[in-house]
Every structure is written in C-alpha cells, then in structure tokens.
Image (cartoon, helix red, strand yellow):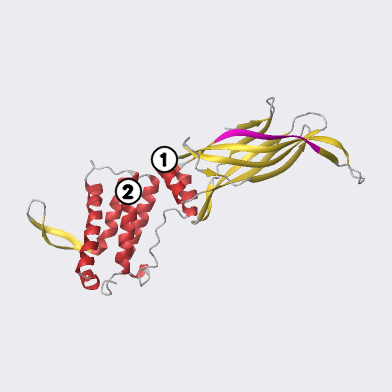
Amino acid sequence: MSDYFSLPGGFIVVETTVDDGVYGTGRPELPLLIVPLRMVLRAPKTPRAALYFRELRCRVSPFDGAHVAISRPRRLEVRLCSGHEVSNHTALLEIPLDDRRISLIERLRKGGDVKLRLDCEISVEELVELGQSEDGFPKEVFGLRQHHCLQSQINVVIPRSAWIERVLPQTGFGQVHILELPAIPIEQCAGLKKAFDALQQAQKLEKQGFYNETVAKCRLALEPFFEMTDGTNAKGEKTKVPVLKNSWEKRLGKATYDWLNGSLVAIKVPGNQASHLSSTNFGQFEAQMLLIVATALLAYALKTQPDAES
C-alpha cells in the first residue's frame, strides 16, 4: 500500500511505502523506533524547472489517537530536474520513545499488532532555472520559486511478532535485571535459576498477550522460597500451607520476615488462580503489575537470602 504527496494542482511528487523492517534501537534511557520508508521521488515536466526535496518529519499517533511523539527531522537532500525520477530512495524515520510512550502503546495493542498513524510533512522547494554557470561547466543555476510543505498520512502496522522480537528487546523496555543481586553466579544455585527462568518466561508471555500464563509463571518463580508447614485452611481444617522459609526470619527479624512472607503469599494466591481456575481471567494491567511486584519482591528476597540457602 502506497501513500502520496502531491503538489498544488494534483501532480504526485512522492510515493511512499513502509518497509517490513521496522525495528527498535537506542538505549533504555532513549529508545528509538526506526520506520524504513521506500520512496519514489519525481519532478513534473515543466520546462526549466526542478524540485529540491529537503526534509521529512512526522507526528506519531498510536491507534488513531492523539499524537505521542514527533520524529527526528530526516534530511532528504535530493534535487530533481524537470521530468526526472528517483525510484528507490530510502529514508529511515527515527521516532524517539520512552517507557511512558511504550507502556501506552502496550496497553492499546492489548496483546495484538501495533498500529501507528504517521502525519507526515515533506519540505519541497520548487526551483526555476536562471541560467548556466559561468565557470565553464554545464551546470544549471536555479533560484527559488516557491516553498511547499506537502502533507500526507502514512499508516503503519507492526505485526505482534515483530514488535516483541525486533522492537521491545532493543529498547530495553520491561527487561528484568536481577542477575547482579545474588552473591554467587546464578548457574550455581538451582533455586535462583528456577526463579529467574520463570520470571523471564513470564515477561515473554506478557509481551505475547498470554496474561493468565504470565501470572502462573510468577507463582512458579516463588516456589524456591517456600516451605510447607502445618496450618489451617479457610474452613478451619488442618492442612499444609506454604510459608517463606524459616531461615529468613533469623536474617531479617520477625517484622520484616512477616512482611516479606505476606507479600509473597499475596502474589502466590492469584498465581494459584491462574494455574488452576479456568474461570479466572487476568488482563494486561493485572499481569504487568503482578510481574513487576513479583520481580521486586524476589530481587529483595535474593539480596537478603541467608547464607545457608545459597
């Protein structure tokens, strides 16, 4: 599908097609979305005339809503004389993002494709030939006749697979960083590795839109920190209940131990529902919040882990 930019009067001077290679780049502090455009540039057949394509920029609106970002100006710097055409010019649109903008897009896409509307503007100068240069070379001398700001909308659909594989990982969005917290390499402790692997799987599932499975993986990440002890259920019956291992109480003190245990159990409850109750459905916001809280709690638990548990 192509989009067009026309001069007053209707002559099409630019045709654009969005390339399939949309990707993310930059750093977590300043991520960029790169949208490659393939462009056909042409000049009308007006005698002694030329067009100078100077600059391209756009405003970005996810899912036809309000615009949330403005692309960096992309210099084109192409001059075409009367009747000439460039059929395969490539321009890479650089769209600055941040965690808030990416989070908004994540909420709007609801586990599906990303749809962006680009309200684009191309700066074009209409030139007129004034004569030949006087240095002995056959080079035209042009003057500015008129300046145009040509506008058009370009609709971009980024498939879900491309968004979660080529965009999000490259921007650093939502990545879990807990490897530096344990005092020993994670590979040397099966319990830590199990928790970390479960969180990595939860993060991947959330990006793919599997929210119940995300919550269930959060529960799985807690398992290495629990032990079963005698207790009672809601009916007053004796049963085995999971609690944070007792060795943490000696390290943290009773008050902090009770807080950490209660917090981990609070995450475990919806995790059990997601694992065993098919009638319970979690949305994206709930899955994201449980993933964030579970990650923070486990990072704290790993940092304060008693030496005996290591």
The residue sitting at 28% across, 56% down in the picture is 220
Is residue 105 located in the magenta-colored stretch of the structure? no
Is residue 152 located in the magenta-colored stretch of the structure? yes
Q: From the viewer's perspective, is 250 left or right of 88?
A: left
Q: Which mark is residue 246?
A: none
User: Does residue 191 appear anywhere in the picture?
Assistant: no
The residue sitting at 57% across, 33% down in the picture is 153
Query: Could you tell me residue 299's position as x and y percent?
Result: 33, 63
Quarter of the image holding residue 232? bottom left
Q: Which residue is mark 1?
A: 108
Q: Amino acid at mark 2?
A: Ala
User: Could you tell me which secondary element the residue under label 2 belongs to?
Assistant: helix
Most frequent secondary structure within the magenta stretch: strand
Q: From the viewer's perspective, is 11 left or right of 203?
A: right
The residue sitting at 59% across, 37% down in the picture is 120
Q: From the viewer's perspective, is 101 left or right of 134?
A: left
Query: Could you tell me residue 292's position as x and y percent?
Result: 34, 54
The one nearer the camera, 280 or 126, is: 126
- Mark pair 1, 2: CA separation: 15 Å
Q: Which residue is mark 2?
A: 287
Q: Amino acid at mark 1?
A: Leu
Locate the N terminus and report the quarter of the image it occupies: top right
User: Could you tell me which secondary element the residue under label 1 belongs to?
Assistant: helix
Could you tell me how many numbered marks the image carries?
2
Point out the tag, 1 or 2, that comes first from the N-terminus: 1
Query: Could you tell me residue 75's position as x and y percent?
Result: 67, 45
Locate the C terminus and report the quarter of the image it occupies: bottom left
The one nearer the camera, 24 or 117, is: 117
Label 1 crowd (10 A; few <14 / some 14-19 / many >=20): some
Query: Could you tell me residue 86's position as x and y percent?
Result: 71, 38
Q: Which residues are magenta?
A: 143-154
Does residue 271 sit above or below 44 in this rendering? below
